[in-house]
Image (cartoon, helix red, strand yellow):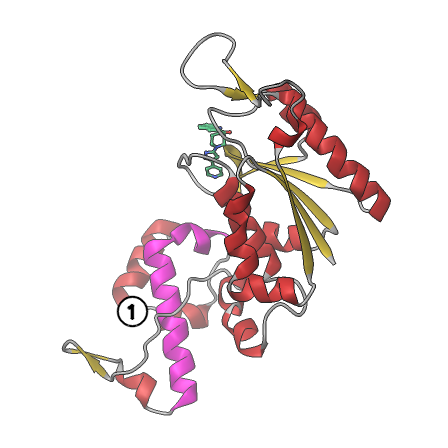
Amino acid sequence: MMRFDVITLFPALFDALLDFGITGRAMDRGLFSFKAWNPRDFATDNYRTVDDRPYGGGPGMVMLAEPLDAAMDAIEAELKQAGAASHVIYFTPRGRPLDHPKVIELASRPALTLIAGRYEGVDERFLRRRVDEEISLGDFVLSGGEIPALAVMDAVIRQLPGSLNNAESALQESFVDGLLDAPCYTRPEVYRGEAVPDVLLSGNHKAIERWRLAQRLKQTAEIRPDLLDKREMNPAEMDLLDEETRRAWAARKGY
Ligand code: 9WO
């Protein structure tokens, strides 16, 4: 069973993940365990202080290293009992961007320790000593690392064997090959004047698969050409692109 330990000032934020949907079901199935650790419980002064003013001045407060180290010591003591080594992640915009291969790598580990920062950040000396890697979800700033921690847990838990049923597994294969998803439609056939593309009602499964791949290639070329840079396109795939998208793609590649 995979184990998640999360250091957070707001453990209640993680209830949603454990109670609902695919991740809630994976919890019920015993695919992972979860424990939240509140640095406040490891503060030793009467006020249970977890933050202090930044050296060098400036607005806001910084998380103290001491309560975080004490929480980490407690986690590592439990992991040692269980015979597992911890892999420690801090969430910050300065981290390495998360992608699917990283999610797969994280899902192969027996235990992850996730640290969610608050205020203006965490004392750098704690990060240098105890964090194995810093991960970013994108170039934006949040009020805390909890939502990135939840996002990583969600992405990792769906990769655990037994987490998805067959239909769900088939669905998620799309991003794995480096292309964006095809658009999807459900009833009614005409919605507010807009019809479902004919091919999807044709019953011609070969034609439907060809259309879906063409849509995925077109959308990826237009919206996320950087994804195609890593992947390249074979001639059959190029043939599926419309003239305009093919020309735009060729220009980008300098053909
Ligand atoms: C904020 C920040 C901003 C610019 C460059 C580097 C930075 N590091 C941090 C930081 O570590 N902030 C702490 C965690 C404390 C304040 C809330 N935190 C946070 C993490 N805000 N936004 C994130 C985050 C994490 C991963 N992906 C996107 C945003």
Magenta span includes 210: yes
Residue 131: x percent and y percent?
66, 32
Identify which residue is drawn at 53% across, 45% down.
12
Identify which residue is drawn at 50% across, 55% down.
16
Q: Main secondary structure of the magenta part?
A: helix
Which residue, given by chain and number where applicable, does mark 1 sit on?
A: 242
Residue 150: x percent and y percent?
53, 49
The crowding category of the residue bearing disc 1, from other C-alpha atoms within 10 Å (few below 14, some 14 to 19, many at least 20), is few
Looking at the rendered structure, the secondary structure element under dot 1 is loop
Query: In the image, is residue 128 above or below residue 207?
Result: above
Residue 153 shown left or right of residue 180 in the figure: right
Query: In the image, is residue 114 above or below residue 164?
Result: above
Q: Which residues are magenta?
A: 204-230
Residue 145 shown left or right of residue 103 in the figure: left
Identify which residue is drawn at 60% across, 52% down.
103
- Mark 1 residue type: Asp
Q: Nearer the viewer, residue 54 or 170?
A: 54
